[in-house]
Image (tube, rainbow, N blue to C red):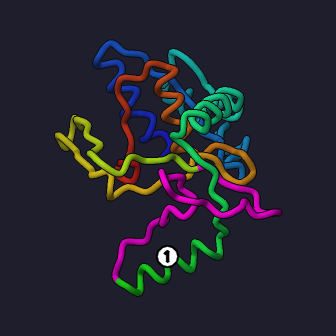
Amino acid sequence: GNLRSALYPWAFARSKGGDFILRIEDTDQERSSLEAVEVILEGMHWLCLDPVEGPIYQMQRMDRYREVIQHMLQNGSAYYCYSTKEELDALREQQMQQGLKPRYDGRWRPEEGKVLPESPQGIPPVIRFKNPKQGDVVWQDLVKGEIRIANQELDDLIIARADGTPTYNFCVVVDDWDMGITQVIRGDDHV
């Protein structure tokens, strides 16, 4: 699976005269291991899928991710959320029983005129992206054509875990921006 996932972007980059950059997306410390990275690197070397740049390890870019998160907190595009796992599980269960799409209800989302509760002691917050409520997210997919998702259907995604570690979905966006990535090949589960 790793080699197939690398082969398509490598071939696409070569066919367009672009650069193939290898990033090791290792922010999920429970699932990432040195052994898994070695398997990826050995397999790519065996198939001569040599990147123009990399491997670039996300864990070595933590200062950059924290800088972006601090900027987002300061400009109001991100916020602290103190909801516990138990609260979120109960919320999801209640929404599913009502036939609703399970999603975060925005209880810690700052809004004009909204009074937030006091930050609870002893609960480390996650940081959420303050997704716009109006408009659409639109992009042109080279396989599927135009993809359009209404912002009201999207959640305020967690961009940093309670331990401060940024999430994969956040890190890849910062990396794509910083590295000038123009084309991304991902599975449907990341659309």
Instruction: Indicate whether 180 appears above or below 30.
Output: above
Q: How many marks?
A: 1
**In the image, is residue 100 part of the stretch drawn in magenta?**
yes
**Front residue (pair 23, 175):** 175
Instruction: Indicate whether 118 appears above or below 12.
Output: below
**Front residue (pair 183, 47):** 183
Q: How crowded is mark 1: few (under 14 residues within 10 Å), some or many (20 or more)?
A: some
- Residue 90 lies, in percent from the top left, at 56, 80
Q: In this view, does 143 lie to the left or right of 128?
A: left
Q: Which residue is drawn at 71% across and 61% down?
A: 118
Q: Which residue is drawn at 36% across and 23% down?
A: 182
**In the image, is residue 120 part of the stretch drawn in magenta?**
yes
What is the residue that sits farthest to the top in this orientation?
17
Instruction: Indicate whether 99 appears above or below 180.
Output: below
Query: Can residue 134 be spotted in the picture?
Result: yes
- Residue 108 lies, in percent from the top left, at 58, 59
Q: Residue at x 67, y 37 (%)?
A: 38
Q: In this picture, which residue range is highlighted in magenta? A: 99-127
Query: Can residue 50 be spotted in the picture?
Result: no
Q: In this view, does 77 lie to the left or right of 9?
A: right
Specify the quadrant of the image occupied by residue 66.
Answer: top right
Main secondary structure type of the part rendered in magenta = loop
What is the residue that sits farthest to the right in this orientation?
122
As shown in the figure, which amino acid type bears the numbered disc 1? Answer: Arg
- Residue 94 lies, in percent from the top left, at 47, 83
What is the residue that sits farthest to the bottom in this orientation?
97
**Front residue (pair 181, 187):** 181
- Residue 39 lies, in percent from the top left, at 63, 40
Can you identify the residue that label 1 sits on? 92
Q: What element carries label 1?
A: helix
What is the residue that sits farthest to the front in this orientation?
113
**Front residue (pair 168, 152):** 152
